[in-house]
Image (tube, coloured by chain):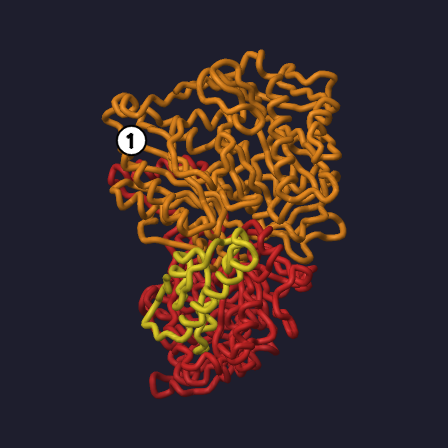
Amino acid sequence: MSKIKVVHYLNQFFAQIGGEEMADMEPELREGLIGPGIALQQALGADYEIVATVICGDNYFGSNLEEAQSRILELIKPYSPQLFVAGPAFNAGRYGVACGTIATAVEKEFGIPALTGMYVENPGVEMFKKDLYIIETANSAAGMRKAMPKIATLAKKLINGNEIDLPAEDGYHERGIRVNYFHDKRGSTRAVDMLLQKVKGEEYQTEYPMPFFDRVPPATPIIDMSKAKVAIVSSGGIVPLGNPDRIESSSATKFGKYDVTGMDRMSKDDFISIHGGYDTAYILEDPNLAIPLDVLREMEKEGQIGELANYFYSTTGTGTSVGNAEVFGTEIGKQLLADGVTAVILTST
Amino acid sequence: MVKEIERYGLPVVHMCTIVPISLTIGANRIVPTVAIPYPLGDPHLGEEKSKNLRRHLVEKGLDALQTEVDGQTVFEE
Amino acid sequence: MKLELGKILIQDVQFGAKTEVVDRTLFVNKEEIIELVLEDDRLIGADVELARPGESVRIAPVKDVIEPRVKVTGGGVLFPGMINKVEQVGSGRTHALVGATVITCGRIVGFQEGLIDMSGPAAKYCPFSETNNVVLVIEPADNLETHDYETAGRLAGLKVAAYIGEAGKNIEPDEVVVYETKPLLEQALQYPDLPKIGYVHMLQSQGLLHDTYYYGVDAKQLVPTFMYPTEIMDGAIVSGNCVAPCDKVTTFHHLNNPIIEDLFARHGKDLNFMGVVLTNENVFLADKDRSSDMTAKLCEFFGFEGVIISEEGYGNPDTDLMMNCQKVSQKGIKVVLITDEFPGRDGKSQSLADTVDEADALVSCGNGNVIINFPPMEKVIGTLDFVETMIGGYEGSLKPDGSIEAELQIVIASTIANGYNKLAARGH
């Protein structure tokens, strides 16, 4: 059996090239293993072989993010690696960010398991834990001996397609990924247990800590609405008859852009709602209840708004993950900006 | 979606019924609407009055887009 | 109020000349059931199929699931205000055919009906993969308006469940469990040293396919009220909703509410179960404000020291859940919430649409967005025509060989947010 090919990523310091003075070094590849690679190879065992090590200066990586990534990917490609390990970076911030960035890029580019290791306070943990398995390490290189076996154990599980255990058991930073399992008690029994603990003032542990939603500073207001180009976006699940883009009625994975050129109002002969979260009978009868095309057209004619964009963007809000909604928003926003839109009305059901 | 569009500097007014959700997710300009199955209008009022109500709500939305805000603001009646 | 619930265990279901229970086998007369269903002229066709645990059978699109029960003694009849006149229930004796159900299925009403697999890898997610099911396949009249179709289907299921339940009336139950809740002041005095615990039961009430009925009253017209828990066991609450299949609280789940069962199991031991506050999940913000205010007021008035709150559905009902949590907590009452999670297919997004700081004790009934593969089954009861438009389904979900790839939420009651199942989610 041929060995599993591993590529290892190190910064200038761990590759024993130099300290801060060498932090600008550009990416280069060495065949075989270097420095911490010895411990990694040992932990991985005889079925694995570190075929190459890529080295890059932390400052170079940080100030040339795009270029560093593409150059490193090019360097690695000929080796067709099956596993990628970066670092570990311990508490080195720039190194942590580099490890996270390149491991994420490798995973995406080659579709292979990529992992790294960091100390809990390394900013790279917060940045990349959702994308990667990041093994929890000590805050300095003194923890190398302990970190490498953990990295190797998890890497092997990923390679072999074994089930990954809880963060505490497999030693990685919790990624905030919600994974199903079967508890030995049903939910209602757990609720009674938890309630009695809470009532008695004992310690209890929620099964889902309240999530965090970030904030965006408000955009500056429109000064003269009669010159503004207004666009409509909706999460009410309004689509043309037949739902051409097959948008899901719940937990949407896509959005649609639908033309309303020449229309004075939304007609029930042209549009329907496929939203699974409410009684759609009213909107099926009058889609203007979700997409206020009729009144916006009037305002456009009266000159209250400069122009109404001749389309609306649409998706289903119910059960749609914030992750997907962010992707939709980013793409819709880009397109709106490119089309000269200056103000947006977003309607939700 | 609201936030990601607003990140480009485009002002967005979120017209929705369940204001608490809008506040939780982080919309900045919020105009409360009528009901989940009919946010902009009220079919029970008949077509003309429903449309007048819609016009009123959309005007409020446009007003919100022309108002300077420091943070999350709900534009009540 | 005191109810004796006689549990008659059913281990098999068969067609027979007479609808009866013999040695733990339920026999059903197909013709009589069909006749009963077709009494309603909104339905022009009906068929009855049987589905047992372990069979290679897929049922879709499922509308409701009901446990056959019968009132033996005590006032009232099953499902008051729905198929029977309104009369107080919850006292005396009721028999249940435990291990049997009636499932209604047929052409889709909306997007919200779901799947049940009787075997294979998806079976472990559904409580009805383990029951002996009498499946009613209904066919609506041409051009029947959707609200009427939903009503006709709902009533057909209840009628058939009550009809089959009659077969248990004179059978000696395998087990009799007694549930009793005394009037408030007496109940408080019965176990003065134990914490007084209540249950806030949120009913889905958002309109077509999202409705629930309380003694025949559409729950969206309710203001929060008090219920003796045993009323629910006699069918005082009926599901008229199909929300998302995974968190649908079927009529079966109302009859067998696990929170009520588990609170009774600890009643007099380490808690004093005082009763149920019933509230709704409406589409107007003003209703949400009003209902949560009144829920908190009732919890305070009844002297609850702790409550469990369960929701039905996701998205905007999360707001009702959070408003209830916040307002009840502000009365100094300890709160535990039960919910399910929708963090996206990758599990990385926020699981709830709304949050409050007070929601610090929450039980998870699982992530409904996980993708599941359903191998083909030898037999399909109903139709797979609507799989791709059902909640949890998507373009390409249904494969030519009859297998399905879809989100877990397409499976009936798989992540039901009253804690009926053992499925849970945790952070990786």
Q: Which chain is yellow?
A: B
Q: Residue at x 42, y 36 (%)?
A: A188
Would you identify the image quadrant in which residue A283 lies?
Answer: bottom right
Q: Position of residue C76 (x, y in %)?
A: 50, 19
Q: Nearer the viewer, residue B64 or A75?
A: B64
Residue A132 lies left or right of residue A81; in this view the side is left
Q: Position of residue C223 (x, y in %)?
A: 40, 39
Q: Which chain is orange?
A: C
Q: Position of residue A269 (x, y in %)?
A: 68, 60
Residue A94 as seen in the image, left or right of residue A267: left
Amino acid of disc 1: Lys
- Of all chains, the one bearing label 1 is C
Q: Secondary structure at mark 1?
A: strand
Residue C275 falls in which quadrant of the image?
A: top left
Chain that appears red: A
Vertical comparison of C123 with C350: above or below: above
Q: Is residue B10 above or below residue C88?
A: below
Percent coordinates x, y for residue A133 in the rendering = 46, 62
- Residue at 67%, 24% in the rendered image: C13
Reply above or below: A134 against C215: below
- Res A170 seen here: no
Image quadrant in which you'd find residue A213: bottom left
Residue that badge 1 annotates: C196
Measured along the vertical axis of the image, is residue C108 above or below residue C15? below
Instruction: Please name whichever residue, C308 or A169, is drawn nearer the observer in this view of the structure.
Output: C308
